Image (cartoon, grey):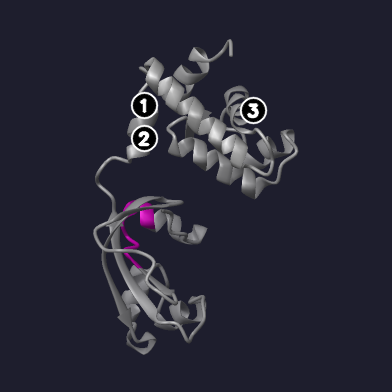
């Protein structure tokens, strides 16, 4: 699961200086002890509590990347009628399982068949039509190219295209970079094994 943060907080999350977040949610959406993906990298949530917004201190606000409590409260999105959650987190220390999966380039016939089955299922479920192999080949031909550029090349909207690439990443077939993507070693092994299909 991903937790969204505005870009201005990414550097602080990545270097560990931003360790708090506040959200107004109708129900709790993250759990302590679990890792979550963010645009700045993976985090581990260590505590979640419901707080009175009036009790948020300037120190809390600074730990959340804001200059003071007033600034944080002014920026706090969501319905004020919902509970305010205080989320404590730290950079995750355990490896991202997707990165470990992506690094595995030794695929046997069962793994190739399993990947093919998953890609076929994604193609069938898409309103766009078959997109998985087309997208893998596109990333292969244009490494670290902007997602918007890649989407335009195949006549797609940027946001759904990015969501689809994330599905390929979850299978360990692509890797994300500050700009664009690359085929992972696992993805390369799959493309090589199915080149004549």
Q: Name the residue under label 3.
A: 134
Q: Closer to the N terminus: mark 3 or mark 2? A: 2
The residue segment tinted magenta is 13-20
Q: Name the residue under label 1.
A: 103
| Circles 3 and 2: CB atoms closer than 8 Å | no
Tell me the quarter of the image containing the C terminus. Answer: top right
Residue 79, position in %: x, y?
Answer: 51, 81
Q: Residue 60 is drawn in which quadrant?
A: bottom left
Across the whole image, how many numbered discs are drawn on residues?
A: 3
Q: Closer to the N terminus: mark 3 or mark 1? A: 1
Query: What is the crowding at mark 1: few (fewer than 14 residues within 10 Å), some, or many (at least 20)?
Result: some
Q: Name the residue under label 2.
A: 99
| Circles 2 and 1: CB atoms closer than 8 Å | yes
Residue 124, position in %: x, y?
Answer: 61, 37
Residue ranking furthest to the bottom: 54
Q: Which residue is drawn at 52% across and 29% down?
A: 182
Residue situated in front as seen by the camera: 44 or 63 = 44
Give the alpha-carbon distance from disc 3 to disc 2, as whole Å. 22 Å
Give the alpha-carbon distance from disc 3 to disc 1, as whole Å. 22 Å
Query: What is the crowding at mark 3: few (fewer than 14 residues within 10 Å), some, or many (at least 20)?
Result: few
Q: Which residue is drawn at 36% across and 76% down?
A: 85
Position of 40 with respect to 43 (left or right) is right
Q: Inspect this view and state whether residue 192 appears.
A: yes
Residue ranking furthest to the right: 155
């Amino acid at each position: 699961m991903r937790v969204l943060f505005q870009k201005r907080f990414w550097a602080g999350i990545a270097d560990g200086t931003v360790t708090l977040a506040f959200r107004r949610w109708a129900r709790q959406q993250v759990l302590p002890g679990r890792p979550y993906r963010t645009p700045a990298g993976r985090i581990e949530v260590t505590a979640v509590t419901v707080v009175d917004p009036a009790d948020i201190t300037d120190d809390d606000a600074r730990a959340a990347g804001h200059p003071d409590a007033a600034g944080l409260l002014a920026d706090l999105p969501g319905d004020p009628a919902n509970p305010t959650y205080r989320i404590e987190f730290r950079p995750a220390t355990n490896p991202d399982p997707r990165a470990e999966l992506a690094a595995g380039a030794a695929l046997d016939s069962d793994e190739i068949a399993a990947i093919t089955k998953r890609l076929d299922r994604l193609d069938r479920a898409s309103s766009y039509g078959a997109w998985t192999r087309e997208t893998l080949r596109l990333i292969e031909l244009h490494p670290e190219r902007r997602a918007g550029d890649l989407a335009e090349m195949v006549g797609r909207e940027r946001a759904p295209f990015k969501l689809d690439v994330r599905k390929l990443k979850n299978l360990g077939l692509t890797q994300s970079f500050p700009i664009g993507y690359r085929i992972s070693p696992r993805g390369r092994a799959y493309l090589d094994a199915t080149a004549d299909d």
